[in-house]
Image (cartoon, rainbow, N blue to C red):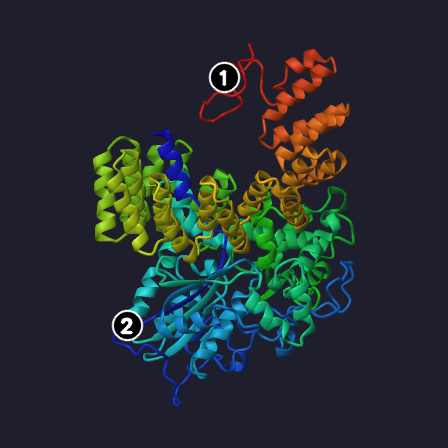
Amino acid sequence: MADKWSSVFAMLLAYSVAAISVIVWVFRTTRPTQFEDSKDVQFPSPNHPAMKGFRSPGGRIPTVSTASPTDLGIKPSIEVGSEHQDNKNSIKNSPTPHDHGTRSDDLVPYVERDIDEALRQAVLRGGFVLVFGPSAAGKSRTAFQSLTALPTNTPVFVPQSPESVSNLVENLDQHRDLVLWLDDLERFLVPGSLSTVVLDRIRGSDHRVLIIATMRSEELAKFEGADTLGTDIQARSLIRAGSDVLSQTDQRIEIRNRLSEKEASIASATADERIRRALAADFGFGEFLAAGPQMMDRWSAGGASALHPGCAIISAAVDCRRAGFSKPIPSKVLQALYREYLEVGLREHHDVLDFAEHLRWSFQRVASASSCLIPQGNDSYMASDYLIDRALAEVGPLAMKEIPESVWSNLLALDDDSTFIWIGISAHYNQRPDVAERAFKAGAERGRPDCMNGLGVSLTARGKVEEGLVWIRRADDAGSPEADANLAYYEWKSGRLEKARSRYLRLAEEHHYIPAMMSLGVMARSQDEAIEEEHWFRRAADSGYPPGMHALAQLFVEQGEFSEAEHWFRRAYAAGHTVSIGALGHSFEARGDYSSAEQAYVQAIGSGEKMAISRLGILLERQGRFEEAEELYRRSALAGHVPCMLSLALLLSDDDRIAESEVWLRRASEAGSPIAMNGLGNLLASRGSSEEADHWFLRAAEKGYPEALLNRSSSLKKQGNRELAGLWWEPFFNGQDKESEGKLDNDDGSPGAPNMK
């Protein structure tokens, strides 16, 4: 039974690692299926209520023919000869916050992509289309290009705040064709912005509306990975509203960061020097053009970001995004935070205190292309999505580092109730239940059902079950289906199975609530009801829900029906659930089909699935292709991927290249990997560097790797220090604390180290 549960939890918590662009066309079946050109289109005036909060350059809403890349947030391309621009602290000729316009000659000529025709047909056909791919793959540029399929006088609305979306729906004139462009869709999946209710109102109106948006990979993973009744019910239950919006997709199309042979052939025929250099780059085509690696170099400052005030400002902005604050960050918040990212001795230095000067440096274009910070107006800024992706992949100055308390406090002090839910969710992901509770409580006290639900789940997770259930019931009374599903979960957990099943069935049948279908599948699985389990997972899959497709595929793998499993893995992957192609590779590998497994892993890597790098490396090693594995690990390690640093170190150690192995163990340790710290401690202890070994063993233990304490004990014994070796648990455990004897601080009471007696 335990295997059943662990496998289904793996199913339901499988995360997509793809950035997406979203193109939504919502229309009634009685309406024409294409936009119609009209010479008599009347635009609302800038003072019209529907125009509030939308960009209107020159006092007018741009159209398909007049919208500039700047209007849509498309960033300029790298300048030839500036790829190796240095990272000096100078701010001479630094831009002002208004100097970030993108001229037509700032962009390289558009390179046709394999998906262009499919995307064009999707735009003309209508429906809800997702275009997904890694960061800097060219999603926005490709979506921008697809607008040429529409009449040239179609207005393009670009909201400056999430609230503007619902404002447009409330006030828009009748019979209006329009495009709604949403950059970073997750910013609009908040209360008072884009929701299923707003989409339903658009469907029920006489408007022809095309919605085009972009979204980062980790954000998609939050929405579609944390699904019903996984081991992490809190994250699952808090983000359902956004998942419901994303579930209304009809088609998803992938853009990869590396060009296909056909795309590369087309690109090579252009005369633009930037394209030629991008084709020869070791990393993604789009990454080169967006100056992604150069932005990372600027932020990292050669490993000395803690000595550079400008880098510290960038780190503060990135951490605000990591903390769930997806709105532009006021400069006063960055000013309050940045010194915490500097070495203690520098924080009061007179050069450091000139915040305005260092802020200007932080939004200076890198290689004449993108900037690390992007001015948003009203003296507010946002960190580049590329840097956010790198940070979440544990690459760069913030790798393996916790978000400081001051970040949480300053963001909550802004008192923006539309952000409380996301700060709370982020705090949960970052293992800060105290912060999550503060954020949810702030929103709950203002009557927000999502925060009531979040507060309830947070309280129950901390053992305050009765108090938590009170808040969940309040959210349920306010009409939250997430809260209703949570009540079913707690009924199930308390043994009231039939009551829980009845609640889930009502949600699934009466409200077509897909997470309830998934929960019914899990419930059937727990009771070995295979037919019922397949029925509900198939219902979720047939509803277009990628995690349902993935769960169904995993079920077919267990049943040995590999053809069906492959079909559903590929369906889920095509729908944006990129972890599914990696799971397909693992299925091939388990059956000994290494060639197909390798192809699947390569495809997963191209879609941004980081875990696939390690899986492919292990597969290569298993086949004795050690040189290829080393090259794969080395390229990823040089890009800052910490797990590959560790894998490379182990591979080099096995090849008796100990000195080189130590280099990578140190890099991974300095990046915060406790496994690498433990390995480095063992290496140092083996050659007699006991003092430094002791340091790394303790660091590893502090990071939550208790095995390092046992290795430290063994090292101390070899040094003849048996008394201290016998107290191996110190300074982390109290030898007089009877509850700590015989285990290593496992919250669930599971056995740890041998009994100390």
Do residues under tags 1 and 2 come within 8 Å of each other at their CB atoms? no
Tell me the kind of residue under disc 2: Arg
Characterize the local packing of mark 1: few (<14), some (14-19) or many (20 or more) Cα atoms within 10 angstroms: few
Q: Residue 61 location in percent, x, y? A: 48, 79
Q: Secondary structure at mark 1?
A: helix
Between residues 125 and 212, which one lies in front from this camera angle? 125
> Which label sits in the foreground, 1 or 2?
2
Tell me the kind of residue under disc 1: Glu
Q: Is residue 638 left or right of residue 543?
A: right
State the CA–CA distance, disc 1 to disc 2.
64 Å
Q: Residue 331 location in percent, x, y? A: 62, 59
Between residues 445 and 396, which one lies in front from this camera angle? 396
Residue found at x 64% / y 78%: 105
Residue projecting furthest to the bottom: 39
Residue found at x 74% / y 16%: 719
Judging by the rendered image, the residue that carries numbered circle 2 is 28
Between residues 160 and 84, which one lies in front from this camera angle? 84
Q: Residue 287 location in percent, x, y? A: 62, 61
Judging by the rendered image, the residue that carries numbered circle 1 is 739
* Residue 121, quarter of picture: bottom left
Q: Is residue 366 left or right of residue 244?
A: right
Characterize the local packing of mark 2: few (<14), some (14-19) or many (20 or more) Cα atoms within 10 angstroms: some
Visible in this render: residue 627?
Answer: yes
Q: Say which quadrant the N terminus sits in.
A: top left
* Residue 289, quarter of picture: bottom right
